[in-house]
Image: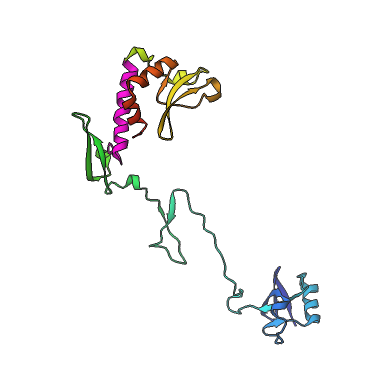
Amino acid sequence: MKIEKINDSTVSVDGVYYSTKPFTECASCALLDYCITIPSLCKTISSLTGISTTNKSFEKIDMETKETKEPKEVRISIPKGYEIDTNNSTFNCIKFKKISKWRNNKLAKISGYYIDILDSDIVEITGAFNDKNNFNIFATKKLAKSAVAMARISQIMANDKRFGGVVTDKEWKECTIKYTIIRSGSDITSNNITGCVNIYIYDFLAFHTPEQRDLFLEENEDLVKDYLMID
């Protein structure tokens, strides 16, 4: 009898391949062509191959494939930016295609609202193409109104000297207090961004003094509500 080790769990006995199984799964079998349970033979296999046979028997493996009936798993590493092309892939050949981003689909149709260049009114539009001619279309009317309010606020803050001017990028990097207007839930709230502790927090509605902030809110509450999208 010729016994040969194939791997840590498989042996060949006279050209027939067997794989280890828990003994309880083959405990009732008595045929050598299905599984080997004869203690002396198991001991021989263990001594010749180094494979542990404690509480185990050997189940016959398909002679043609030399594999067990257990399913095999193959993991595929998908390149970044790609996905599996399910329409053109087969079990033997997996093909990849670049991930299709909606933002790049110029034939997609969009609907929403845009700001009229003549009078800044909010205009509804439907069935527009998703291309650069229509990148100024907002998904909702509230978002479009917020954009108009942001533009108006930026001009007021830049040109009305009573409000101290826009807080610059340089000032945002400094350890000084900024006095801001923010949205908390559905309410307008005043907030202080304190020195270096919150140096990296940015708010559009930011002022140099609390007096500038409070005066701005008093005179422009309607624009602040539109910008913060508060009904």
Q: Main secondary structure of the magenta part?
A: helix
Query: Would you say residue 208 is visible in this rendering?
Result: no
**Which of the 4 image quarters holds residue 39?**
bottom right
Along the line of sight, the residue nearer the viewer: 183 or 90: 183
Horizontal arrangement in the rendering, residue 96 relative to residue 60 (left or right): left
Q: How is the image coloured?
A: rainbow
- Quadrant of the snapshot with the C terminus: top left
Q: Residue at x 37, y 17 (%)?
A: 215
Q: Residue at x 32, y 26 (%)?
A: 223
Residue 87, x across and y down, in percent: 38, 62
Q: Is residue 65 magenta?
A: no
Q: Against 90, is 148 above or below? A: above
**Which of the 4 image quarters holds residue 43?**
bottom right
Give the residue furthest to the left: 118
Give the residue furthest to the top: 161
Residue 12, x across and y down, in percent: 69, 77
Along the line of sight, the residue nearer the viewer: 101 or 141: 141
Query: Would you say residue 204 is visible in this rendering?
Result: yes
- Quadrant of the snapshot with the N terminus: bottom right
Q: Is residue 151 magenta?
A: yes
Residue 224, x across and y down, in percent: 35, 27
Q: How many marks?
A: 0
Horizontal arrangement in the rendering, residue 88 relative to residue 60 (left or right): left
**Which of the 4 image quarters holds residue 14?**
bottom right
Q: Against 103, is 173 above or below? A: above
Give the residues drawn in magenta, as a range: 135-159
Horizontal arrangement in the rendering, residue 207 relative to residue 129 (left or right): right
Residue 143, x across and y down, in percent: 32, 36
Q: Residue at x 59, y 75 (%)?
A: 69
Q: Residue at x 77, y 83 (%)?
A: 38
Q: Against 49, is 188 above or below? A: above
